[in-house]
Amino acid sequence: MNRTLNPRVALTPSLIIIVGFLTVCPVVMLIFGSFSEGLGAFGSFTLEKYTHAYTDPAFAGIIINTIIFTIGSAFVATGLALFLAYLNTRTNIPFKFLFRIISIIPMMIPHILFSVSWVLLLNPSNGLINLFLREILSLEGSPFNIYTLQGMILVEGLLDLPIAYLILAPAMASFDVSFEESSRVCGASNLRTLTRVTLPVLRPAILASFILVIVRSLASFAVPSVIGMPGRIYVLATHIYRIIATGFAADYGMAAAVGMSALAASITLIYLYRYLTSESEKYVTISSRGYNPSVIDLKNAKYPLFGIVGILSLVLIILPVLVLFYISLVPYSMVPSAKAFSMMSWKHWIEVLRDPISLLSLRNSVFLGVVGASLGVTLSVFVAYVIVKIRTRASGLLESLSFLSFSFPGIVVGVGFMWFFVHTPLYATIWALLIGYIATYLPYGIRPLTSAFVQIHSHLEESSRVCGGGTLYTLRRVIIPLLIPGIVSGWILMATMFVRELTLSVVLSRPGTEVLAVQIFRFAEDGLWGQLSALGIIMIFISSTLVVIASLIGAKLTKVETVSQ
Amino acid sequence: MGISIKGLNKDYFSEGKRIRALADVDLTIPARQIFTLLGPSGCGKTTLLRCIVGLETPDSGEIAIGGETVWSKEKGIFVPPEKRGLNMVFQTYAIWPHMNVFDNVAYPLQTRKEPKKDIIKKVKKTLRFVQLEGFENRPATKLSGGQQQRVALARALIAEPKVILFDEPLSNLDAKLREETRKELRDFLTELKITAVYVTHDRVEALALSDSIAVMKDGSIMEIGSPKKIYFHSDHRFVADFIGRANLVEGRVRAVEDSYAIIDSSIGTITCPKSPDTSPGNTVSICIRPEFIRVMEKNTRESRNIFRGKVDSLVFIGEVYEGEIIIGDTRIFTRIEPTLTIREGDEITLFLDPDHCFVISE
């Protein structure tokens, strides 16, 4: 018998083991941890953590805050996204390229920096806008206070706007225009058509966006920690953080017990989301007659509406970076003025570049970004290959496993991994962070690669096999070169995520394994805004550099035209 | 090298329904021949080809190439495609868009790590053979359909495979180019004396290219034979109808005289060559191809197979009229010379060549 161990056959099970470990391990450890006495006493069963966590009188308030925060953010993000998507796909608003920028750029700005810049603008003691208004209106107190639930909702809503937009814009663009046309033929006005036909037909997509934003804001840590904690407004994520990071003794058992409810809520919502997206594919008909852009003439409203969009893009993109850069140069928060400009110096930058912990965090983050993204993308290539090209029941299982972590809130995964790493030599090493990162962000690598694989005709692979190329040879000579564009975008996504990672790192990072976002978070806790801003700009710079380098390498590797088949 | 296939089965599951792609296929493909699998889409011909090459796994049965078993459920043998020593030309050509012509063609040699010098020499030789001399550095995306097809052929030939398989390789070419390429392909393959298995649904292609044709239907092989045998003396009604236009007339054998059978049919008495099925009293189907029906003068000297009929429709398609003639209650398709002056509604006399009417056994 010449039936040797075929690498093609062994691929699926080994990937299921690896990905299964990465995604299931933190959850299993979280469950066991929640029933254990403490990190040192793993496995000694107790229900005490649950009773303790859920009988805490403050817990009800935290749940209410969480609900208001997540639903509020969902309203803000979905409402704004609807507005922008409608204007872009259905009206003759000018400068449409701006919409693409608005939908992509905020992803490039790390959430913690975005939150910090809003704190710098609107905090009650020395927020720039508050200072400015106090000066010109000679007010006693500050008109705005960012450290409130409303402030959190505003910032989180703006941060999640791109996700909502990316769900709603394609749904609106592919929506069959004849629905609207028939309504207008029936004599309905534009507005009536919008409210009676367009929005109801888009309802599944709107709900999907709404739910996804709830999941994201439930998992969000940057906004609740930077904006919520100073105002003593706690949501589930910050509550978990408080349990493990403050007070006299970190209680990982109780954190796990609280984490269980965040996890359960998140998984339920993701299932609802998946159900809705499959529904929306059913109802939002993509007409094959070709997209017929029947745009609505905005007439006089054209420029005022564009003004709103312009202000939004200013607020989303330019303002945060500008504020950070400004604050990194002035000695303390002050309204821009001649005096402020005369006092500008590189003091904060020099301090940061001399601070050993900041430098260490810089090194760690670059290492995690480069090495982590490379390993993560390598794994993603194999996983995406099995998902798209080897369609068996086992590959279906792999697909579900690899997208599972989408529904896990980062801080909960962090607590789960903590329970695991504590029992391994990886604890408090950079490799613990690396494994955690890959586990949490695997879908970001797999997504672009699955779509790349879908585009490669199976004949291209089969002809290599027939020509004598084994599985690995085929992978190296045919599949991977054709995948380079997908690999590059997967790498860029993962690398930028890793360089800015906060939520997971805040749990797993120990002295010696500090990373950029955690260091920035420490600066925020200590109110060192100048140094924070300098380090923040460095972080944005590193992300952008990685993106540029990856794109250049990708362009060099793919000198060939696009895949035609 | 010949291919022998025994008891091959393969089922597909599509939307909860079981589809038999291959139903107990037994087949011997002789060496150094062009062997064609012909059939309508969904008949299992491509599945059979993919099983031979190893891209698909049958459910049961056995495949041997040149005496070596490459797949057997019972013996637990599965030789992967890259180790079967075959090559294949795909319907889409599967030219790798990120490589130039040289790398595409050299690929099979590169997988075997042959010395660079030999590879360059062989690529040059093969490209000359397929008339693409000097195309080595052309990017694959800058090739026309016909050129891609030839690159695919060069890639399939270069490593001198035992068997070369073709999966509808001409179906993506336009009609004129298809005719030219078909002729070229025939010349290439005859020159190389190679075993070729060719899958197509195009009967003209099959007739023009093949040494033998196997006609498939619903996962089974209906009939195997030379193009002439399949065309003139097919045993099956389905095959007769699929391979060309056919008039099928039912009748009962009245008598057998010398080498002819006399059959009472729905259009009258037909004389045709006798066959094992033409014992007097048997019910039979007779196949008459339109091109063997001639329009005669009213008082022709022919005495056999003369019928009177009314022209029901007449369509001028260039080289002939396609006519539908009603004889009794039966509609007969004919091809009528375009120079004849006949109009719809005319009564005409038809002569069915007795040597080209044949009885279908099933």
Image (cartoon, coloured by chain):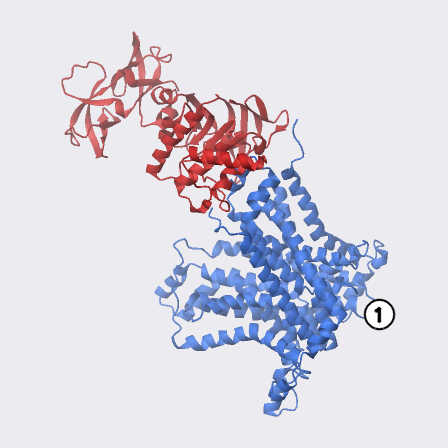
Give the residue type that dot 1 points to.
Phe
Tell me where residue B274 sits by quadrant: top left
Determine crowd level at label 1: few under 14, some 14-19, many 20+ residues with C-alpha closer than 10 A.
few
Shade representing chain B: red
Task: Give the percent coordinates (x, y) of residue A32.
Answer: 78, 54
Local secondary structure at mark 1 = loop
Q: Which residue is under mark 1?
A: A248
- Give above or below for B186 relative to A399: above
Q: Is residue A513 visible?
A: yes
Q: Residue furthest front?
A: B117
- Identify which residue, A173 or B247, lies in the foreground: A173
Shade representing chain A: blue
Task: Give the percent coordinates (x, y) of residue A176.
Answer: 42, 58
Q: Is residue A48 left or right of residue A137?
A: right
Tell me where residue B243 sits by quadrant: top left
Kindly identify the residue that appears in the image at 69 percent across and 58 percent down: A437
- Identify which residue, B130 or B179, lies in the foreground: B130
